[in-house]
């Protein structure tokens, strides 16, 4: 039944283009959880202290609503790719803004350093190197919307351990530290979370 989702999204896109407000609303509701996990995975741990992923999702949804007429695609894959580009643009904008602010603050507070010094030395952590991120790999999976919907049905702890381990690719030691648990406890939690995710996906598999 993996192909049933694509026609559904395609029909919603067509209805939204015809001016059907219900289709348009359903189209955006359908992808909110998906964007939430995508945003969570794209935001570096150091940046998460400065911005809530839900704020990035809200901004992305607002811009997608505003610019919907500019979307030229027809399929679920094209729709999600368009949303991801908007989200990535918003993340990049925030990173540039944050780094610029951090540099200005450091220049005011400490002596001027070597201009060739890295941004980490200026006090703003360096974002991840370009290339495929864990979130991008997650979002390239088949049935992306169903995966995100199933993940959103899990308990907060199960969501957290999957996001940290599978999307952010942290080691179990790092996940344990982030969640305030022992490594064995986190490994058991992760295995249970994966089983729960598989069970949530099974009705549509």
Image: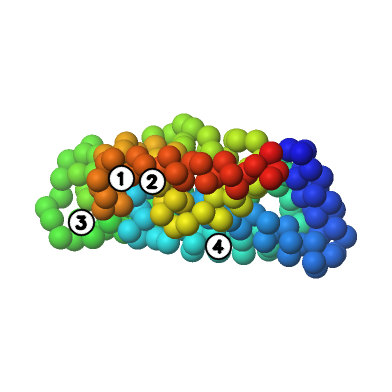
Distance of label 3 from label 2 (alpha carbons): 41 Å
Residue 182 position, x and y percent, is: 25, 45
- The tag earlier along the polypeptide, 3 or 2, is 3
Image point (57%, 41%), residue name: 198
The dot on residue 59 is 4
Rate crowding at label 2 as few (under 14), some (14 to 19) or many (20 or more) other CA atoms within 10 Å. Answer: some
| Residue 106 sits above or below residue 144 on the image | below
Image point (53%, 35%), residue name: 137
Q: Nearer the viewer, residue 202 or 53?
A: 202
Q: Which residue is mark 3?
A: 106
Do we see residue 54 in this rendering? yes
Q: Nearer the viewer, residue 188 or 45?
A: 188
Residue 2 position, x and y percent, is: 73, 38
Residue 23 position, x and y percent, is: 80, 61
Task: Check if mark 1's residue and mark 4's residue have beta carbons within 8 Å.
Answer: no
Q: Which residue is mark 1?
A: 185
Q: Which residue is mark 2?
A: 189
Give the quarter of the image for residue 168: top left
Identity of the residue furthest to the right in this view:
18
Looking at the rendered image, the disc whose residue lies closer to the viewer, 1 or 4, is 1
Do we see residue 93 in this rendering? no
- The tag earlier along the polypeptide, 3 or 1, is 3
Residue 104 horizontal side relative to residue 91, left or right: left
Residue 70 horizontal side relative to residue 58, left or right: right
Distance of label 4 from label 2 (alpha carbons): 33 Å
Residue 53 position, x and y percent, is: 46, 58
Distance of label 3 from label 1 (alpha carbons): 41 Å
Distance of label 4 from label 3 (alpha carbons): 29 Å
């Amino acid at each position: 039944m993996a192909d049933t989702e694509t026609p559904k999204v395609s029909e919603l896109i067509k209805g939204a283009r015809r001016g059907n407000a219900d289709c348009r609303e359903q189209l955006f509701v359908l992808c909110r959880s998906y964007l939430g996990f995508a945003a969570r995975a794209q935001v570096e741990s150091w940046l998460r202290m400065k911005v809530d992923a839900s704020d990035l999702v809200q901004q992305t949804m607002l811009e997608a609503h505003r610019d919907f007429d500019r979307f030229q695609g027809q399929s679920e894959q094209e729709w999600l790719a368009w949303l991801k580009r908007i989200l990535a643009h918003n993340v990049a904008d925030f990173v540039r803004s944050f780094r610029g602010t951090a540099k200005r603050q450091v220049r005011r507070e400490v002596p001027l350093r070597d201009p060739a010094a890295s941004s980490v030395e200026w006090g703003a952590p360096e974002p991840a190197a370009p290339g495929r991120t864990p979130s991008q790999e997650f979002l390239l999976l088949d049935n992306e919307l169903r995966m995100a919907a199933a993940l959103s049905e899990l308990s907060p702890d199960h969501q957290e351990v999957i996001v940290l381990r599978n999307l952010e690719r942290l080691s179990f030691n790092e996940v344990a530290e982030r969640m305030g648990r022992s490594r064995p406890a986190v490994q058991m939690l992760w295995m249970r979370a994966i089983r729960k995710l598989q069970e949530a996906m099974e009705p549509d598999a």
